[in-house]
Image: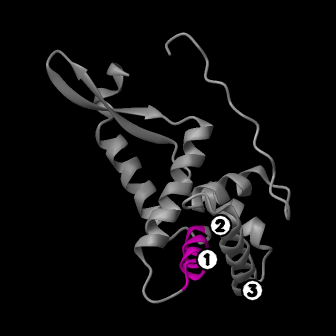
Amino acid sequence: MRGKQAVRRKIKPDAVFGSEDLAKFINYVMKDGKKSVAENIVYKMLEDVSRKTKVAGIEVFEKALENIKPKLEIRSKRVGGANFQVPVPVNGNRQFTLACKWILEAARGSRKNIEFYESLSREIINAYKKEGSAIKKKEDVHKMAEANKAFSQFA
């Protein structure tokens, strides 16, 4: 694949808010190809978020994603028989992907006899306030990158 640029398919915006990011997030939530179930979960989550924060759900969602997106990550690089953890900047698509994965990972991990949309809304609100598991994950990644800054010449 070297030398060729990957072709990005255009994703259709979601039906309610017209947001491409929300449509991608719905696809991340989806399991076993059940998109309507994923849409119901996400729209319920947005209603729950707007009810709890008194701010439009889509605005809270977008701000939460912005708060979670990492600027740096570490990649393993083999140099002369030794593996180094090299900090590298993260491009926009990967930032979005990591943010979505971390939110879903935190929401799926914190479920204790509550509906998934409730744990998802709790995680989104926490990210909006710059707290919670997904924010901690981002901070951990940034700390690792900072600790390995000495190896950045191998990037």
Residue 125 included in the magenta stretch of the image: yes
Residue under circle 2? 38
In the image, taking residue 36 as reference, residue 103 lies left or right, namely left
Instruction: State which quarter of the image contains the C terminus.
Output: top left
Quarter location, residue 14? bottom right
Does 54 sit above or below residue 12?
below
Q: Earlier in the sequence, mark 3 or mark 2?
A: 2
The amino acid type found where label 3 is placed reads Arg
Disc number for residue 121: 1
Viewer-proximal residue among 16 and 81: 16
Image spot of residue 7 (x, y percent): 66, 25
Disc number for residue 18: none
- Name the residue: 66% across, 73% down: 41
Q: CA distance from mark 3 to mark 1?
A: 10 Å
In the image, taking residue 109 as reference, residue 80 lies left or right, namely left
Viewer-proximal residue among 133 and 108: 108
The amino acid type found where label 1 is placed reads Ser
Which residue in the rendered view is the most extreme toward the left? 81
Q: Nearer the viewer, mark 3 or mark 2?
A: 2
Q: CA distance from mark 3 to mark 2?
A: 20 Å
Q: CA distance from mark 1 to mark 2?
A: 14 Å
Residue 132 shows in this picture: no
Image spot of residue 96 (x, y percent): 60, 47
Image spot of residue 141 (x, y percent): 39, 49
Q: Earlier in the sequence, mark 3 or mark 1?
A: 3
Viewer-proximal residue among 86 and 104: 104
Which residue in the rendered view is the most extreme toward the top? 3
- Principal secondary structure, stretch drawn in magenta: helix
- Name the residue: 45% across, 89% down: 113
Please report the bounds of the magenta region as a residue range.
115-127
Residue under circle 3? 51
The amino acid type found where label 2 is placed reads Ala
